[in-house]
Image (spheres, rainbow, N blue to C red):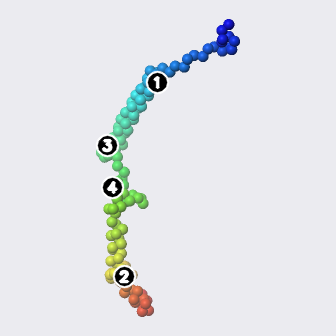
Amino acid sequence: MTEHAHSGHPPAEVDRIQSWTVVAVGVASLLLFFVAAAITVTYMRREELVLNPAHPMLPSEAGKRKIGIVEQQLFENADRARTLQAQKQAQLGSYGWIDRQKGLVHVPVDQAVDRLLQGERP
């Protein structure tokens, strides 16, 4: 009797990987991916032209210095804070109207402190 007759199992086959099948599946997968990507890009470009034929797709906020709370410019170029601070400093050292109708004026802060220390009240 043969060996497999005693064990009850047929002999095992030799494991062989057919490399040409693996390569063919890989090439077919890549080809399918590139065809699907090309179809998708073509479709998206057509839809873009249909939805917005005259202009490129740009958000309405594009080009603004600030969108929401996010600064859209380089911090080195953001000089609004320095400008505002210089204006406030100039206002602290000068005379001017705050509200003409109500009769409110601003005076130099040093003079206002001196008057307050002398007992004058606005």
Indicate which label's residue lies in the foreground, 4 or 3. 4
Front residue of 96 and 89: 89
Q: Identify the residue at image location x=42%, y=31%.
A: 33
Q: Earlier along the polypeptide chain: callout 4 or callout 2?
A: 4
Q: What residue sits right under mark 2 in the picture?
A: 106
User: Which is in the foreground here, disc 1 or disc 3?
Assistant: 1
Q: Quadrant of residue 117?
A: bottom left
Query: Which of the two labelled residues, at mark 2 and mark 1, occupies the earlier sequence position?
Result: 1
Query: Which amino acid does the dot numbered 4 rest on?
Result: Gly
Q: Amino acid at mark 2?
A: His
* 4 or 1: mark nearer the eye: 1
Q: Residue at (61%, 14%) from the top-left corner?
A: 11
The residue singled out by tag 4 in the image is: 63
Residue 105 visible here: no
Q: CA distance from mark 2 to mark 3?
A: 55 Å
Q: Can the viewer see residue 69 in this picture?
A: yes
Whole-Å distance between the Cαs marked 4 and 1?
Answer: 51 Å
Number of the label disc, if any, that sits on residue 91: none
Give the x, y percent position of residue 68: 41, 59
Mark 2 or 3, nearer chain start: 3
Which residue is the extreme one toward the top?
A: 1
Q: Secondary structure at mark 2?
A: strand
Residue 59 to residue 49: above or below:
below
What residue did someone put label 3 on?
53
Report how far apart the C-alphas of labels 4 and 3 lie in the structure: 21 Å
